[in-house]
């Protein structure tokens, strides 16, 4: 649908304006988002076999709710969500598959930008998302696609999440860049019109602060490399949100591939908002002391705190990568 047709259809009463939508996805400026778009890139994917069951667990299990679920349009068309879910869908617009050979990491728009954004509006999605892989041979094409979607989103008051990953073979970060291109990724997303960016963890609080401080929009931390211990993910989210300026996380396999995705969402919320969830400033003192003794002690101390207060995640959920 072109811009003239858009002007004849006022969806504001149905969805609210961009700021209202963002506030519902990032309540109090923070959020736990779950990415479930993996089935387009590859299949099979453990944890995504029964999407209705997964979404049920993420949108209303004992009051535990993900703030957003990232999914492709077909999932949104077929999967029901409860009316009292305060979060919302983020419709992912980018696609490629593992069968694409040298183009496997070239994320293309699966349709025209204007039509895709309009389709997200019709589906009552609260945001759309686009992926760019910095350093890929087709980086310029992905940047063009991001720009096209950003303009469509601006015209129709739709929030835009940029998933920006510095990982292509041509990546050339400045030798002095401690973030290895992650700060540049966040900056690119903001300057091209994103309202939220998702980027990888940089490995340290100090370097991730350089990422979050270089943009005036919310930064979500991605799930990171494969880990066999969910407590590693909890530590990362805790450090990113509590000390490094992240607004939350957007994680896939480390949530949906576990035996109890809802519990993992709960634990991520506890890691993100440790002061309000722990109600025990002593654990934070322990963490700071452990941090001065080295990263291994930080993991150990945080894990001890979680096990003592909330149980052992290894005993309650299957450990998988993101």
Image (spheres, rainbow, N blue to C red):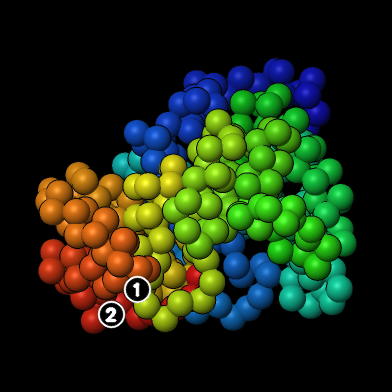
Q: Nearer the viewer, residue 18 or 285?
A: 285
Residue 18 left/right relative to 28: right
Q: Nearer the viewer, mark 1 or mark 2?
A: 1
What residue sits right under mark 1 in the picture? 296
Going 44% across and 42% down the picture, which residue do you hit? 245
Q: Residue 288: tell me if it is visible.
A: yes
Q: Residue at x 61, y 20 (%)?
A: 10
Q: Which mark is residue 157?
A: none
Name above or below for residue 317 compared with residue 163: below
Point 51% across, 50% down: residue: 208
Q: Is residue 186 left or right of residue 270?
A: right
**Rendering coords of residue 209 (x, y %):** 49, 45
Query: In this figure, which residue is indicated by the disc labeled 2?
Result: 314
Instruction: Report helix, strand or loop for mark 2.
Output: helix
Q: In which quarter of the view is residue 167 placed? A: bottom right
321 vs 144: above or below? below
Q: Position of residue 52 (x, y in %)?
A: 43, 64
Decide if residue 133 is on the left or right side of residue 37. right
Q: Residue at x 19, y 54 (%)?
A: 285
Secondary structure under tag 1 reads: helix
Residue 80, visible in the rendered structure:
no
Please state which of residues 306 and 153 is positioned toward the viewer in this rendering. Answer: 306
Give the side of residue 203 with respect to residue 133, left or right: left
**Separation of disc 1 and disc 2 at Cα?**
18 Å
Mark 2 crowdedness (10 Å alpha carbons): few <14, some 14-19, many ≥20: few
């Amino acid at each position: 649908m072109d811009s003239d047709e858009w002007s004849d259809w006022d969806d504001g009463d149905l969805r609210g304006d961009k700021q209202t939508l963002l506030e519902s996805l990032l309540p109090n400026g923070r959020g736990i988002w779950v990415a479930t778009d993996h089935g387009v890139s590859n299949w099979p994917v453990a944890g995504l076999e029964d999407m209705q069951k997964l979404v049920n667990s993420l949108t209303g299990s004992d009051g535990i709710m993900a703030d957003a679920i990232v999914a492709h349009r077909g999932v949104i068309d077929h999967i029901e969500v409860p009316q009292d879910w305060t979060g919302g869908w983020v419709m992912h617009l980018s696609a490629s598959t593992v069968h694409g050979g040298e183009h496997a990491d070239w994320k293309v728009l699966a349709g025209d930008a204007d039509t895709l954004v309009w389709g997200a509006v019709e589906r009552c999605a609260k945001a759309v998302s686009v992926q760019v892989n910095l350093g890929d041979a087709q980086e310029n094409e992905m940047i063009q696609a991001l720009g096209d979607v950003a303009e469509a989103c601006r015209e129709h008051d739709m929030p835009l999440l940029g998933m920006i990953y510095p990982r292509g073979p041509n990546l050339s970060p400045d030798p002095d860049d401690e973030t290895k291109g992650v700060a540049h990724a966040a900056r690119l997303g903001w300057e091209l019109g994103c309202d939220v960016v998702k980027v990888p963890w940089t490995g340290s609080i100090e370097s991730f602060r350089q990422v979050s401080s270089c943009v005036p929009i919310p930064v979500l931390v991605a799930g990171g490399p494969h880990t066999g211990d969910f407590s590693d993910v909890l530590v990362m989210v805790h450090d990113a949100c509590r000390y490094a300026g992240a607004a939350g996380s957007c994680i896939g396999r480390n949530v949906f591939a576990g035996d109890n995705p809802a519990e993992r969402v709960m634990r991520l919320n506890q890691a993100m908002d440790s002061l309000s969830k722990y109600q025990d400033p002593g654990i934070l003192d322990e963490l700071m002391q452990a941090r001065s003794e080295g990263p291994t002690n930080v993991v150990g101390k945080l894990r001890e705190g979680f096990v003592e207060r909330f149980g052992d995640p290894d005993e309650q959920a299957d450990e998988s990568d993101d």
